[in-house]
Image (cartoon, helix red, strand yellow):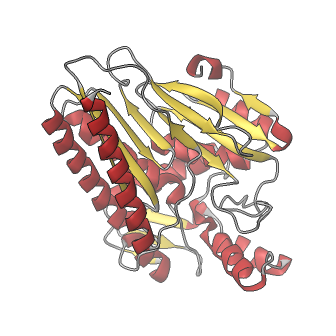
Amino acid sequence: MDKGYLKKRMEEMVDRRNCLKLMGILGFGAVAPALIAKPSEGKLPANLNQVSRTRPLMGTFVNITIVDPSRDKAEEIQEKAFARMGELIKIFDRHAADTPVSWLNTRGVLNDVPPDMAAVLHQSAYFNHISKGAFDVTVLPLLELYKATFAKTGGPPKVQQIKEKMALVDSDKIKIDKQGIRFLKEGMQITLDGIAKGYIIDQAANLIERHGIKYALINAGGDIRAIGGNGPEKAWKVGIRDPWGRREYVEVLELNNGAVATSGNYERYFDKDKRHHHIVDKTTGDSPRETVSATVVAPTVMEADALSTALFVLKPHDSVNFAHSLADVETMIIARGGKTFRSKGWKQVSS
């Protein structure tokens, strides 16, 4: 067996073992990724090295793979990319008490707004607007209600409780100006989980590109950003997980210089039937029923993340029509019963 290949596989196994230990120590729940970066096929050119590192971040495994002539440079840039992600997590982690997002949720106002947070909130407003409210970062009160009620009673909240929380879901009631950010309704809260993760990955990818790396892949628990291919004239392979587990993948994509993300009802859910989960339709106060999985290919992970959530909320036909209205966006929707809906250009990005 090739010694270089063996060394690389040993490094990857050690990384994953260490990450599993850390996940246990830190209490993270590892969610099975909806998208899987497939192992490389064939050998790289002799002048290129592939360096892959995995770490527990954002409640999942984050892998950064860089292909470059210099192994030392690849390892150095990996460290810088992970560090940049760590800086941004300290802004957007709503589960930690000392982050700007947590301060805003606790106080309803934030005067000293980090530029990265302002950028994500402005983009959130944009996606809320173009999706006609299907993407809305103010759904946190509803999500917290479902989480608490299922934990306490094993069942969903009562209709009146849901209606009370629905009254707090309205992105138009977030005021952003030179003085800062404030909620116009008492009790409002936001979750940027459906967009900030993508922003963090994109910022790490931008850093990698600025340092002259031509080939790289970031896989954050299934949110994937590709820089170039897996070496010259060679695409990265990304498998879309089968929601029912009947096979490993329902489809495999070839990805170059772009991003892909999937929202699925099997990622985080409150009941064993997966009828109530982490995606909520603010018009009903409950999780959508028709869609099981929504995959989006877009130029950035932030765009793919936000749109996959919005398309999950919409009806499958409406989701495909919405994707058709957007530049450089393709989608595949898997509905209950296994029926699949694809945008017109989907076959151009799949294999």
Instruction: Look at 26% across and 34% down and name the residue there.
Output: 209
Question: Is 262 positioned to the left or the right of 26 in the image?
Answer: right
- Which picture quadrant has residue 271? bottom right
Q: Is residue 39 above or below residue 285?
A: above
Q: Is residue 54 above or below residue 104?
A: above
- Which picture quadrant has residue 44? top left
Q: Position of residue 316 (x, y in %)?
A: 78, 38
Q: Is residue 91 visible?
A: yes
Q: Position of residue 66 (x, y in %)?
A: 29, 35
Residue lying at the far front in this picture: please name it: 1
Question: Is 349 positioned to the left or the right of 112 in the image?
Answer: right
Q: Is residue 181 above or below residue 35?
A: below
Instruction: Look at 56% across and 21% down and name the residue there.
Output: 349
Residue lying at the far top in this picture: please name it: 233
Question: Which quadrant: the C terminus?
Answer: top right
Question: Is 72 positioned to the left or the right of 276 in the image?
Answer: left
Q: Is residue 167 visible?
A: no
Question: Which quadrant: the N terminus?
Answer: top left
Q: Position of residue 100 (x, y in %)?
A: 37, 71
Instruction: Look at 33% across and 52% down and name the residue there.
Output: 14
